[in-house]
Image (cartoon, rainbow, N blue to C red):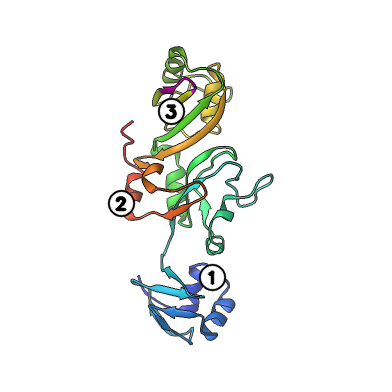
Amino acid sequence: MSKLSLDRILQSQGFGTRKYCRTLVEDGEVAVNGVVHDSYKTPVDTESLVLTVFDEEWVYREHVYIALHKPANFECSRKPSHHPGVLTLLPEQFTWRDVQPVGRLDHDTTGMLLMSDDGPFIHAQSSPKRHVPKVYQATTAEPVTDELVAQLLAGVQLHDEPAPLAAQVCIRRGEHQLEIVLEQGKYHQVKRMLAAAGNHCSALHRSAIGGLELSALGLEEGEWCFLDAAQLALLAGSTGA
C-alpha cells in the first residue's frame, strides 16, 4: 500500500475520470475513513482505507476479485451482441476500472463466473497449463446410461481436437443429470462431449472452480461477492470430487 492523491484513488476505484473525481471531492461528496475531504491533492494512505462516496461506503482495493452467480441469457463479453452483458449485473464502478470475466460461460449456461481487473490473475486462471478442475452439472436430453458415463471417462473425439478429451470425473446424479469435472476448458466442451457421446446437453451449470464451491458463497442468481485471500487460494485446490 502507499499514499496517493485522493483524485487518483477515486479514479483507480472506478468513480470516473480524474476531472470528475476532483469535482466529487471539491463538492464535499467524499469522506476518507469517515472524514469529509475538500482537497483532492492531499496524499491519502491506502492502507485500511474506507471511502464514502454519495453516502455509500467502499473499501479501497488495489484489485478486485469477484465471483458472480451468472444467470442464463447473459453474455460474458464487454461488447455483447444478442443478450445483456454480465457487467450490467455489477456496479458501474467495475466497468470504469476495467473488470473483465475470467474465461467465458455460454449465454445459456449458469453458475460460477470469476471476474477481476488484475491482468496476471485473469491470465493465470485462464491458462490451460494450470489444469484447474471445473465442476459442471449437466442436464441431458436423453437418459444417462452407464455406457455414456464410461465414454466420457474414457474420452470422446471432437472434430477439431487432435486427441480424445476425457472427463476427470463423471458421476450420474439422476436419470437426466450428470456431474462432470473437466480440466481442459475447451470451447463448449461439455456440450460437445455429450453430443459426441450420443446425447445432448439441455442445461448446464458450473458449480465449482478448483476447491471453491458456488454453494458455499450463498449467492442467488445474479448476485456477486468479493473473494478474500482464503477463497482465492481454493481456486487452485482440489475439488474432492
**The residue under label 1 is which amino acid type?**
Phe
Residue 122 to residue 193: above or below: below
Query: Which type of secondary structure does the marked residue at label 3 adopt?
Result: strand
Q: Residue at x 65, y 48 (%)?
A: 80
Q: Quadrant of the N terminus?
A: bottom left
For marks 1 and 2, the one nearer the N-term is 1
Which corner quadrant of the image does residue 234 belong to?
Answer: top left
**The residue under label 2 is which amino acid type?**
Ala
The residue that disc 3 covers is: 180
Q: Residue at x 64, y 51 (%)?
A: 79
Other-residue count near label 2 (Cα within 10 Å), few / some / many at <14 / 14–19 / ≥20: few
- The foreground one among 101 and 157 is 101
Q: Which mark is residue 15?
A: 1
Cα–Cα gap, marks 3 and 2:
25 Å
Q: Is residue 219 magenta?
A: no
Magenta span: 172-176
